[in-house]
Amino acid sequence: MTDSSERPLEVEETNRGTRTDEGWLSEYARDHVVHGLVIVAFLVYPVVYDLLGRSPLASEAAAFLPGLTFMIAVLYLGLFAMSFDFVSGYTGYLSFGHAAFYGTGAYAVVLATNGKIPGVPADTPFVLTMLLGAVLAGVLALAMGAVSFRLTGVYFAMITLGFAQVLYELVRNWGYVSPNPSEGATVDGGALEVGVPYVDSLGLAVGRLTGDSFENVLGTGFDVSATMTSYYALALVVVVCYFSMQRIIHSPFGKAMIAVRENEERAEAVGYDVFRIKMGAFAASAFFAGIAGALFAGYSRSVSPESTYFFLVTADALIVTIVGGIGTLAGPLYGTVFHEWLGDVLSTEDDGIATYLRETVPEGLLTTDVGGVTFADVINSVVDGRAPLYLGIVFVLFVLFVPNGLLGTVRDRLGGTVAERTGDVLERYRR
Amino acid sequence: MTLLELEGVHTYYDESHVLQGVDLAVEEGEIVALVGRNGVGKTTTLRSILQLTPPREGVVRFRGEDVTSEHTHEVADRGVGWVPEERRTFGYLSVEENVRVAVRSDQDFDALREYVFDLFPALERFREKEARNLSGGQQQMLAIARGMVGDNDLLLVDEPSEGLAPMIVDQVVEALREASAETTMILVEQNFPLAMDLADRFYLLDHGTVVESGPTADVSADDERIRRYLSA
């Protein structure tokens, strides 16, 4: 958009404009091939991981691949990060207080399940408490937005952060939540009933401690663990939420959100009430953040102020959004995969790279002393539990050299979204 | 019929008193040029009409109604379109989406899209491309198109020829002529001969006030009273 940019763009005329005559179903399918592949990858991952765990490569798989519990965290944290990107990446307003919505969704589930929300019976199914949490988060966003959207830029980010920290302190000291509110609250009683017709009769339930397991599924000799059941249940919700957000972004409202991000004055001058658009986007993003928090609470069955309302929860979403690509919606999910993978493989627990190295590197090499430092010391100081260190380094490198993030860079290279471009390539091959 | 009236408009940027009592009127169907040196308040006049920079004193009337206390989107909803300077489009929206955001909900988008591509055939082959990837002239055409599709009765066009190659300027002028057949226009333009060529009447601004006005047919850039205000 420089004044000297008089060079006409030389690109091929696309044929997308002529597609309307074709069946919308095949067009839709073509545009969603990539989405389908990603969903399939998430579907088969637990199975592949399980099979690898029983193969000769078991120790390598445990060391270098994220475990299932980490992949479950990818789901709810990924959804949270996508909701953060939904408002921050598409309207340009950095929601630094986004943890407040995640916390509201999480606490709503735990409080409702413990019968502590007036008018909500303790046996209310999880699906309803999840929606309740999401709606409450949306309402909270409207209240926060009414004040915060009077400001822009860094001031908006700071005031939302301030609101979230106020709520963090409140929840931390609110005796109604639990006898020890600073430690958080736990779901009393048994399994959380899902609450979807016909699904409960299958005996599924949310929560790693209570989810059902299935042995020898369809006579294949394959067992579905309780954790795996939770993984698929959560994944289903995340997929629905992703496509909902994606639909909104591709709707006229979504285009108006982008117009606001590009230039608020111009958006207003074409007739948009930008305040309403920002409020709508903020509330919608808070709704999905609330769902993410509810999934976290439903799965972990316990919440604490530190794991929900704390500002570092938002910071994690910001980091994975930058790594995955801000303003790409799906990018933060990939950023979360990276984040959780790094956290898993560099963890101090049994199945990390550190353990693998200690077990596989010959004893002689481990204890070889070079200038007073052994290889075992190196593992302890630069590998074992060092995920935050490398995450920080990666974050800095991305900000410096890959500012558009993983998915943003790929889109720039392809000249459009991966889903669209893949559809175009497939179309060309078909002809 | 008078479409737009400004009466004693005073507009400030913080403490800087930019418009110091601007009076002007625009009749339906005409093109009015606002001319003058850099910094005399031409763009600010447009911003004041749209309430992007609301006047502290004075009245802006559109179709006889005072719009001074309205929000920008309300003024836009009345049928005032804006083609901002530096041909600002929504860079990360495609050409088609740039048109779509300007189309009102009760309008037929498909028909308007085809109307735009008939008017600016150069844009059609880039319909799926993000606007930031277009050339300067193409972006200017898109900005004009965006102003035209919103069912606007008045189009505020800010410096349409700025920074464009002469050949592209000709295309843009042609586009503006096409646009003027359908809508009233206020044109802010540094290029005095171009402004006089396009417009029916002009207002010459200096130090935030109107110092000369009249039909463009009566003046030329050599005119002493004009030259005095245009030369730096």
Image (spheres, coloured by chain):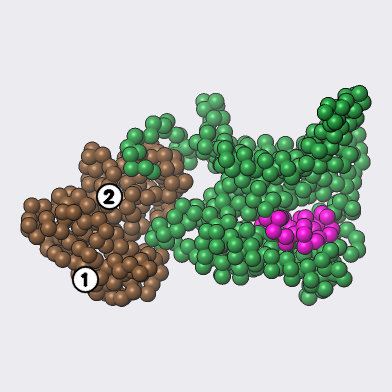
Magenta segment, principal secondary structure?
A: helix
Residue drawn at x 46%, y 52% is A262
Residue A34 horizontal side relative to residue A261, left or right? right
For label 2, the SS is loop
Q: Residues within 10 Å of mark 1 (few under 14, many from 20)?
A: some
Residue bounds of the magenta highlight: A286-314
- A382 vs A128: above or below: above
- As displayed, is residue A423 above or below residue A167? above
Q: Image check: A332 left or right of A74?
A: left
Q: Which mark is residue A267?
A: none
Task: List x then y, in percent, for residue B116.
Answer: 33, 47
- Location of residue B114 with respect to B78 vertically, above or below: above
The mark that comes first in sequence, 1 or 2, is: 1
Report which colour depicts chain A: green
- Amino acid identity at mark 1: Asp
| Chain ID, mark 1 | B
Chain letter for the brown part: B
What residue is shown with label 2? B160
Residue A168 on the magenta segment: no
From this view, report whether residue A227 is shown above or below residue A264. above
Q: Is residue B183 visible?
A: no
Where residue B23 is drawn, which disc sits there?
Answer: 1
Q: Residue at x 67, y 41 (%)?
A: A393
Viewer-closest of A53 and B105: A53
Q: Nearer the viewer, residue B82 or B210?
A: B210
